[in-house]
Amino acid sequence: MSRTFTGRNRLSAVLLTIGLIAGVGATPTAIAIAPVADLAPAPAAPQKAPTPPRTPKPNLWLQMHAGPNSELTGAKVVVTNDKGKVVGTGTTNAAGTLVMKVDSGASAKHPYLVRTSGGKVRGKKFTGHLELVVTKLGLAQGAQYVDLVTTIASAYVEAYGGTRVSR
């Protein structure tokens, strides 16, 4: 049984009656509990929310396909500049997509090379690689597709001239 009453300080107190069941001779015991307001800690000084780390804005959206309806998932992607320096890395998701931030500077005169390794296509291990020569950065360009055609074009440019990209 529980009763609430107001004392002269207008603070509530609760009187609890606990029946102890200890065999035949159970006797009820009364316990008074102090008001919660009396036990509350002093209010803490307001704290500033931690500033989340700055995430660089992505500037390269890649879509990897080894064929029609054959996304390249879980593939490691390395982006290098025309001098062979790595300017970005990442891994494709379950849709064969990778949106990433790479160092700026790609242009027709100074292209970047995107190259994949590993991954799976339709659940089977992919042992080849795909390539793409990138001359413009920015998500406004939309997805840049990395597939068999871009891989052949990259090999053609390397073999017969044009925009050179080192491997």
Image: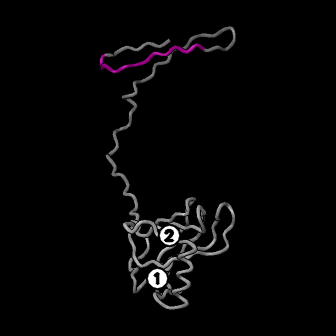
Say if 36 sits above or below 133 in the image.
above
Q: Residue 120, image x and y in percent?
A: 64, 65
User: In the figure, residue 73 lies in which quadrant?
Assistant: bottom right
The Cα atoms of the two marked residues, 2 and 1, are separated by 18 Å
121 part of magenta stretch: no
- Give the SS element for disc 2: strand
The circle on residue 81 is: 1
Q: In front here: 152 or 19? A: 152
Q: Residue 10, image x and y in percent?
A: 30, 19
Task: State the residue at coordinates (38%, 33%).
Answer: 40
Q: How many marks?
A: 2
Are circles 2 and 1 on residues that touch, CB within 8 Å?
no
State whether the magenta stretch is mostly helix, strand or loop: strand
- Give the SS element for disc 1: loop
Identify which amino acid the numbered label 1 is placed on: Asn
User: In the figure, residue 29 lies in which quadrant?
Assistant: top right
Image quarter (top left, top right, bottom left or bottom right) of the C terminus:
bottom right
Q: Horizontal placement of 65 versus 107: left or right? A: right
Q: Residue 32, image x and y in percent?
A: 46, 19
Identify which amino acid the numbered label 2 is placed on: Tyr
Q: Horizontal placement of 77 versus 82: left or right? A: right
Task: State the residue at coordinates (65%, 75%).
Answer: 128
Residue identifier under label 2 = 145
Q: Nearer the viewer, mark 2 or mark 1?
A: 2
Residue 11, can we see it?
Answer: yes
Q: Find the magenta span and give its range.
A: 8-19
- Local packing at callout 2 (Cα closer than 10 Å; few below 14, some 14-19, many 20+) is some
Earlier residue among tags 2 and 1: 1
User: In the figure, residue 44 lies in which quadrant?
Assistant: top left
Residue 115, can we see it?
Answer: no
